[in-house]
Image (tube, coloured by chain):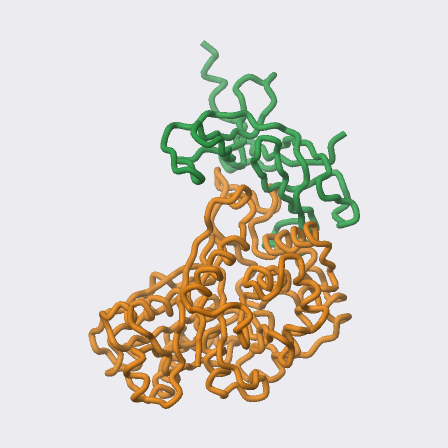
Amino acid sequence: MREVAMVGAGMIKFGRYPEKGVHELAAQAALLALQDADMTMKDVELLASGNLYQSSAMIGQRIMKEIGQTGIPVINVANACATGSTAYREAYMAVASGAYDTALAVGSEQMGKMGLLGGGGGGGGGGISPEGIVGSGLMPAVFGQAGVEHMRNYGTTEEQFAKIAVKNHKHSMHNPYSQYQVEMSLEDVMNARTIAWPNTLYMCCPTGDGAAAAVLTTMEKAKQLTTEPIKVATSTLTSDPYTERDLTMPDVNTLTKNASKLAYEDAGVGAEDLDLVELHDCFATAEMLHYENLGLCGEGEAGKLIDDKETYVGGRIPVNASGGLLSKGHPLGATGVANICEVYWHLKGQAGGRQVEGAKVGLAHVIGLGSACTIHILQK
Amino acid sequence: MAEAETQGKQVKPILPFLHISDNPDEKPYLAGSKCKSCGATYLGARMACSKCFSTEPMEDVKLSDKGELHVFSIVHQSAPGIPTPYVAAIVDLPEGVSVRCNIEGVEPDPKNLKFGMPVEMYTEIVHTDRDGNDIMAFKFRPAK
């Protein structure tokens, strides 16, 4: 496998764009990433496009109709919330394998004000939905239960989960790409209406529209383009292995633990080497679990990590400097690419008011329920 | 000559693994399958064992109607038309199977629920489909 570098990043502010087509949002992000890399579509040899809800609409090809049709191979990817990061991985694999020198990954989604989402199938028979009658497969309940399991195991409190939301909303104040930029107190978060206990409204990510894109090329080419190439040290993808409750209660932990172990081995770095992490905080409870799953602290120590404010920008290991999904938004197909762009900007020193000073190694983690987990580690 | 009258309206399970017997004296139960190679037990049927990959046909098992509350959430906002709040739970059965379910019989408040508390299954008709069939669901409540 060849060394792969990221040489361009682009994203549009996440929000709601009912007047635009999703391919236009995607094309906008693609152009931004290409401009950042000082390239045009004629330099791209493969395009991987991630989009979940319009996965049959050939978004990748429609992007090229907006910004340049060259007849290159296009892969349209769907992998739940890990859709964008899986597209990024397709681009990475294309370059790493030696088959192509330069590839473009684009993630996009237009959710509008879509309601609560479910994951991983499991519908009922006879046309009658079991939702709300036989438990819940909707994401708020699934991630509520996952958080409650952490409470059961380690005595984690509602307040500790809420503190995570306080941190991410605070971080968002410095991110112009964030869908919401509203600072909130612990009381604001805890007194908000409950969606699915223990997560209140401000502990759940919003729905929305957005797009992000990245240009990947060989390290050799990257060195001709820039004096400070950003290496993609690993692109790791896992699915959920057999665990006892997984078929009933999605196990969001084991596949992330497996992915982080593989990713650290592949990249030759450990959790202690990371300067920042963008992880999949679809709910505040999820971020708590992933502190441990990614090895940012020991088992059962995640509550203390947030109590001690170690995951704030300026802390020992800043997590979700972007504001996370909780503030930045979570247009499903865009999220995985956007997380990697955020890490890229920190390593390039381009993250503005939220910059993690001197960042050299960063990790981007995404989980899609069903389940799929990606971890990308970028290195300066 | 009057047998044909029994055709038509039926009681149907909300999920395929809720087993409803033709014999009205037999209580409905959750049907599972057990891998003959490694013993892993599943809710409903599986084509092969997800744990050990054995493709030998599995053993049908009748799952217990008593279990323990593993975890829960109190759902306050759901899809349109679904009444809230309610307790969405995961219950562990002694056969090593977990079940997603509602917990009824308690006010939906975290203080009324204890990890590991014993719960028991019951069934009720929750809907009538457009063909007039009754849809039966299973629910759990604190064990008496």
Q: Position of residue B43 (x, y in %)?
A: 52, 35
Front residue (pair A22, A174): A174
Q: Residue at x 54, y 54 (%)?
A: A252
* Quadrant, the C terminus of chain A: bottom left
Residue B77 appears in the figure: no
Front residue (pair B86, B120): B120
* Quadrant, the N terminus of chain A: bottom left
Q: Residue at x 67, y 65 (%)?
A: A201
Examine the image and state in which quarter residue A244 appears.
top right
Residue placed farthest to the top in the image? Answer: B1
Q: Is residue A78 left or right of residue A133?
A: left
Q: Residue at x 51, y 33 (%)?
A: B41
Q: Is residue B135 left or right of residue A80?
A: right
Residue placed farthest to the right in the image? Answer: B111
Front residue (pair B22, B101): B101
Kindly indicate which chain is depicted in green in the rendered structure: B
Against B5, is B89 above or below? below
Q: Position of residue A349 (x, y in %)?
A: 50, 88
Against A62, is A359 above or below? below
Residue A96 appears in the figure: yes
Q: Position of residue A103 (x, y in %)?
A: 30, 75
Q: Residue at x 59, y 61 (%)?
A: A292
Kindly indicate which chain is depicted in orange in the rendered structure: A
Against A102, is A367 above or below? above
Instruction: Please state the total of marks drawn on the protein image.
Output: 0
Against A284, is B71 above or below? above
Examine the image and state in which quarter residue A245 appears.
top right
